[in-house]
Amino acid sequence: MHPYARLRPGTGFEPLKAALYYAQRLATTPPVREAVARSIGFVVNRLHDDPSLYRSLSPIERPLQELERDGLARLDPVLSSEEVDLLVARLNCEPLVGPEGKLVSLDEARIQCSMAAYPLSTLLDCQVVRDFANSPVLLTIARNYLGCTPTISSIGVRWSFPKPSRLDGTQIFHRDVDDWRFMKAFIYLTDVDHESGPHRYVKRTHCTSSRLRALPYSSVQLEQEYGAETIETVVGPRGTTFLADTFGIHCGMPPLTRPRLILQVQYSVLPIYAFRYDPLKLPISSGENRYVNRLLLQ
């Protein structure tokens, strides 16, 4: 995962990033956010649009419509079962970022952490992860949903372990307010049922206003305001792939019986100014657009 920038006064404070990040945080209504995103997207397309990145809309018309309507959409698998197996086998041998930023083994992480992520350098050194992020299907959906050539603004692979007494903030219903407009692609790398930390999403809340303060939401409050039928739980075998506009209210449930491993890629119109980017010097393959990947690779 990406380290965070210093957005408050103190050592390492980045005032420009703070201004750009909080400007979009202060815009709580979707119409304002969409208007600004369209203006930015117009400039991005004039400078960086590349039709060769995209595919026909026909195969992805249904998930794109669902994403626009509900904020959540299932997608046909982007990675084969063999690619998923290859990725998991590779990651199981790699260290994770544990407490206080120290690298720990998977066995140590199970004991010490409720959640643990792999270093970004590990992920970018894995071609399966990069192929997923740069899949023409995902880039085509992102281009149409965002209204412009997308920026890959974050990539993460994270374990969630069965420790219900130690909830992470992402395991409580919340909104992400990362950019003027953004979406995420997720793929389960383990089998996920109702007991192993499924993603939950309150459909159509991506079209509702956010709060100025990033306060969590309770399940009771959400059921009363939106109806229990709007809260969808995403379960499925490894390889299950789905899209979400996480400006909408969502959470990853804490696992109760089995750990969950998930890969997520975020696409946005701009960089996420809450993050501190340090692109790695790795070769860019023929299937990777330099502008789309500029925050990750140089």
Image: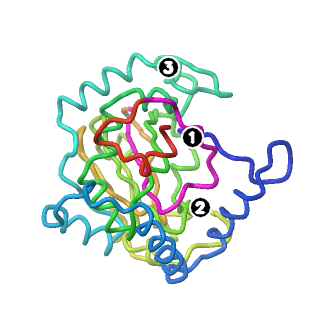
Mark 2 or mark 1: name the one nearer the start of the chain: 1
Residue lying furthest left: 58
With respect to residue 183, does 261 lie above or below?
Answer: above
In the picture as drawn, the residue positioned furthest to the bottom comes out as 31
Instruction: Decide which of tag 1 and tag 3 comes sooner along the chain.
Output: 1
Out of 179 and 39, give the one closest to the viewer: 39
- Label 1, label 3: how far apart the Cα atoms are: 16 Å
Magenta segment includes 262: yes
Circle 2: residue type? Pro
Of the pair 108 and 276, the residue shown nearer to us: 276
Instruction: Name which residue lies at 27% across and 47% down.
Output: 135
Instruction: Check disc 2: other Cα within 10 Å, few if <14, some if 14-19, many if 20+.
Output: some
Residue at horizontal 31 percent and vertical 41 percent from the top: 188
What secondary structure is marked by label 3? loop
Q: Going by the picture, which residue comes out furthest to the front? A: 47
Q: Please identify the residue farthest to the right as the structure is shown.
A: 10
